[in-house]
Image: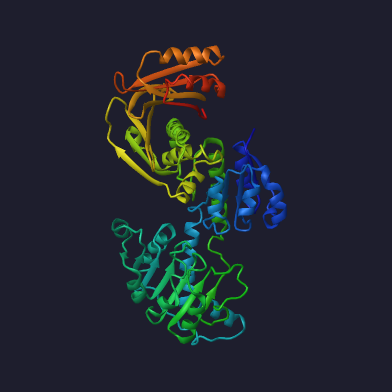
Amino acid sequence: MAPKVLISDSLSDAAVQIFRDRGIDVTFEPKLGKDKDALLARIHEFDGLAIRSATKVTEKLLEAATNLKVVGRAGIGTDNVDKPAASKKGVIVMNTPYGNMITTAEHAIAMMFAVARQIPEANASTHAGKWEKSRFMGVELAGKTLGVIGAGNIGGIVCDRARGLKMKVVAYDPFLSEERATELHIEKVDLDTLLGRADFITLHVPLTDQTRNILSGENIAKLKPGVRIVNCARGGLVDEAALAEALKSGHVAGAAFDVFAEEPATDSPLFNLPNVVVTPHLGAATSEAQENVALQVAEQMSDYLLTGAVSNALNMPSVTAEEAKVMGPWLKLADHLGAFVGQMTDEPIEAIEIVYNGSVSAMNLDALNCSAIAGVMKATNPDVNMVSAPVIARERGVEISTTRQDKSGVFDGYVKLVVKTATRERSVAGTVFTDGKPRFIQIKGINIDAEIGAHMLYTTNKDTPGIIGTLGQTLGENGVNIANFTLGRSDRGQDAIALLYLDEQPPAAVLEKLRVTNLFQNIAPLRFDV
């Protein structure tokens, strides 16, 4: 059955057609996003939800979305999506960060010009029949210092455009490397230095706990007198009330805002101030940008629903279509390894260590980690997936560590998973053979070569004669067929294990017959999603 996608906000006809061309069953109801009750009643029907900013993806909506796998936001901002709730539900949240980068950067530059030359006020005055040439004295951008807070995708474009205007550019961004700063021909500085040097400041960061009110009243007081501030990023980055007071006092010469703490903004301390330019969140409002983000979200959602490829996800590592093809068997192996130790562990897990050896160590380890953690967590929460599992692990205080190793041993690459509890440690390792099938190659330090099936039986015992016969006879007499089996031991007469691939799950009564022989230390039926 074809995946079903609901488009609940306005998207271009071309984007709708992409879904159809890719074989997606798409429902286009662009007004549904504004009707919360109607959307709530319909959302259970769909595997994917494509939105802009009107649709609010709340925890309540996600609870009703029993089949939902992905939310795609045509644009950058996802403030209208409850991402923690989506992650817990196992729903991927994607955005389209590249489709409107140039448009947003150009709007920031345009706003800078507008506030520097008082263009909106001069326009209104001239339309009113006035000729107030001497009233509107502006300043040049050339030679001025621009402070860029956030030099990522959009901020980097603004830096480039500003240098073309012969501005000096300084940037504050904790994630900006010296190499990238050199590439952009800008100076990396701390926030206080930027506040004291900049003639113009433009913000290009997301709204987080760390960036909220980054231009607070305290920081506004540190600004160079006569500075002009541009915000085309996110409302809430600037204390609007404190900025309004600084504008009235003359400490700040002007401001240009496209975003506000409360939107739609029908009132703001910045409104009706003569030295303030405001627009209604137009940063991405060009025909080119709207088309780009719509097409991009349609392709991304189709890729995920049809091939498993993940692009621009905010709550899961991205996996390209090419990676998905190569990594598919390794992702399945990581899930199997996690499922094995998860089913074998009956006490709280304190730590999960994942070792990647050889060829697999060069792959997308973030995605492999998510698959392994999901495998572990499924034993106690069958509904978890690669999105929700890391969230649940963090909530439970599970420490996750990853190690890369160069090739060692006979295998080109392998993955080893170690789970630690307060009282013990369990380990299992596996690899992918050339036929693309995952296999277990080591359990509790004992080397094996085991095919993985949907129903398996794992036993541990001291290495003594009669184990194989007892297993075969007991299972056979009770109608349980063994499709394949693997044995291993640490040494003669020491610890030994058996891993049997069965055609069906053995009944509890059969397992009890094995236990009463007193030959086995542990007897564990296992299930795997193959």
What colour scheme governs how the chains and residues are painted in the rendered image of this protein?
rainbow
Q: Quadrant of residue 153?
A: bottom left
Q: Is residue 12 visible?
A: no
The residue located at (36%, 16%) in the rendering is 464
Above or below 179: residue 137 = below
The residue located at (58%, 83%) in the rendering is 125
**27 or 420: nearer the eye?**
420
Give the x, y percent position of residue 468: 42, 14
Q: Is residue 139 visible?
A: yes
Give the x, y percent position of residue 90: 54, 45
Is 107 situated left or right of 156 in this image?
right
The residue located at (43%, 64%) in the rendering is 210
Above or below 460: residue 36 = below
Above or below 353: residue 243 = below
Q: Quadrant of residue 280?
A: bottom right
**20 or 47: nearer the eye?**
47
Give the x, y percent position of residue 69: 58, 43
Q: Quadrant of residue 522?
A: top left
Is 473 situated left or right of 429 in this image?
right
Q: How many marks?
A: 0
Q: Quadrant of the N terminus?
A: top right
**257 or 435: nearer the eye?**
435
The residue located at (42%, 47%) in the rendering is 398
Give the x, y percent position of residue 507: 57, 22
